[in-house]
Amino acid sequence: MVLQKPKGTQDLLPGTVEKWQYLEQKARDVCRRFNYKEIRTPIFEHTELFQRGVGETTDIVEKEMYTFRDKGERSMSLRPEGTAGVVRAYVENKLYGEPEISKLFYIGPMFRYEQPQAGRYRQFHQFGIEAFGSVDSTLDAEVIALGYLFYKEIGLKDVRVEVNSVGTPEDRALYRSKLLEFLTPLKDKLCRDCQSRLERNPLRVLDCKVDQGHFEGAPSILDSLSEASSAHFEKVREALEAMGIPYSVNPRLVRGLDYYTHTAFEYKAEGIGAIDTVGGGGRYNGLVAQVGGHDQPGVGLGLGLERILLVMEAKGIEIPPSPQPDVYLIALGEQAEMKAAELLFQLRSRGLTAEKDYQSRKMKAQLKSADRLQARYAAILGEDELAAGNISLKNLADGQQETIPLDRLAEALAEKK
Ligand code: ATP
Ligand code: MG
């Protein structure tokens, strides 16, 4: 039996991988403009990092982690998200960097043991950013703006931004008791997941897609915020407005990670069936200390790349075409083949994209390959040309053919670019 890839994973083949490169390149370019620097952390970490950094009562840690014992009997987990690892690296490498703040980004695979469906995989990829060292509201707004600009530049022009404030742990404790008062009488009507969430994480209940019908008149977290928390949120909104970023306030937005404080936000788009969230993030002022570092505030986001590609596909958004190969070398005869190998290396060394046949096929078959590859030129080297020190250059777009000295080939191709 032929072995198959694990459930919930994907092979990214040529033809598709270019789309990934395009997204990655755009992400890097946007980060450059906002002055975020790349960080690469391990794909597996001590399980404890995620327990502390993501939160014991989250779906991720409770149900979705790929956890295993290594040969040294240590409990390790494949990273289910990017923030915990970046926070650990920030602390471990003392990137406190005062008086400057640290602005970092990552792009890479994440792993969650979930039921695969469109837009939900077991290995998926995130582009994320984290900014440490400031409680300034304009930094929250900058993070939201970076994601917004990224979506916009890849053609997802109608991504919606939803923002909320989940306040401080104290604000949330107050809200939690008000919310429990509202939700407890409804318990029997809620879905199974929400019934068990009710005690452990009641804020998540309001986020439930199934139970939305029951939540009319639910208390809003925005009414439980302290004055300082409200002021922070107000300034985030002001900064978004100053930048001209459209958003709406969704007081039920809480996100599935425990570490958020104050600002929480999501990006929404249509085109992936039941799923509409393509990315999200928020502020996490207690997290760095929780992972064992100085008490430094942070704010960040994580965007799923698979979901972006699904939305692009649904909306018919194309990526810019890859450049065509410059030339396909057609060599006829053994001597010409050796010369072609030499020429090919010269052309490639000069930065041209060049290819040849490796199966000693007939001229006609080789010309077909040149067409299939969409090469701009075919360069034909037969025994006669070789003897005369020439090569024929055929423009594959208009069929024009000319003969040029062999040693002018690279130059001629470069001129014709
Ligand atoms: P969901 O509610 O859809 O499960 P989440 O709250 O678990 O999302 P986050 O942890 O906030 O998602 O991750 C940020 C982004 O990463 C998501 O908005 C999504 O684009 C992507 N993402 C999360 N889980 C998956 C997955 N299993 N497969 C593909 N993309 C994912
Ligand atoms: Mg999830």
Image (spheres, rainbow, N blue to C red):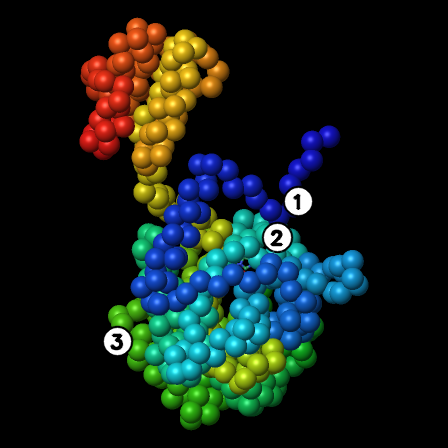
Q: Which residue is at the front of the view, 185 or 47?
A: 47
What residue sits 30% from the left and 69% below the top?
A: 245
Q: Residues within 10 Å of mark 1 (few under 14, many from 20)?
A: few
Q: Choose the circle earlier in sequence order: 2 or 3.
A: 2
Q: Amino acid at mark 2?
A: Arg
As drawn, is 260 to the left or to the right of 136?
A: right
What residue sits 60% from the left and 58% below the top?
A: 43
Q: Which residue is mark 3?
A: 242
Q: Amino acid at mark 1?
A: Pro
Whether the residue under disc 2 has CB within 8 Å of ligand 1: yes
Q: Which residue is at the front of the view, 246 or 309?
A: 309
Mark 2 vs mark 1, CA separation in Å: 9 Å
Figure quadrant of the N terminus: top right
Marks 2 and 3 close (CB-CB < 8 Å): no
Mark 1 vs mark 3, CA separation in Å: 47 Å
As drawn, is 338 to the left or to the right of 246?
A: right
Q: Which residue is mark 2?
A: 122
Residue 344 position, x and y percent, is 37, 26
Q: Where is ligand 1, by quadrant?
A: bottom right
Q: Which residue is mark 1?
A: 6
Q: Which residue is at the front of the view, 152 or 174?
A: 152
Q: Secondary structure at mark 3?
A: helix
Marks 1 and 3 close (CB-CB < 8 Å): no
Q: How many marks?
A: 3
Instruction: Work out which residue is located at the far bottom of the displayed protein and give it.
Output: 227
Residue 129 position, x and y percent, is 45, 66
Residue 383: name its quadrant. Answer: top left
Marks 2 and 1 close (CB-CB < 8 Å): yes
As drawn, is 395 to the left or to the right of 262?
A: left
Figure quadrant of the C terminus: top left
Q: Secondary structure at mark 2?
A: loop
Mark 2 vs mark 3, CA separation in Å: 39 Å
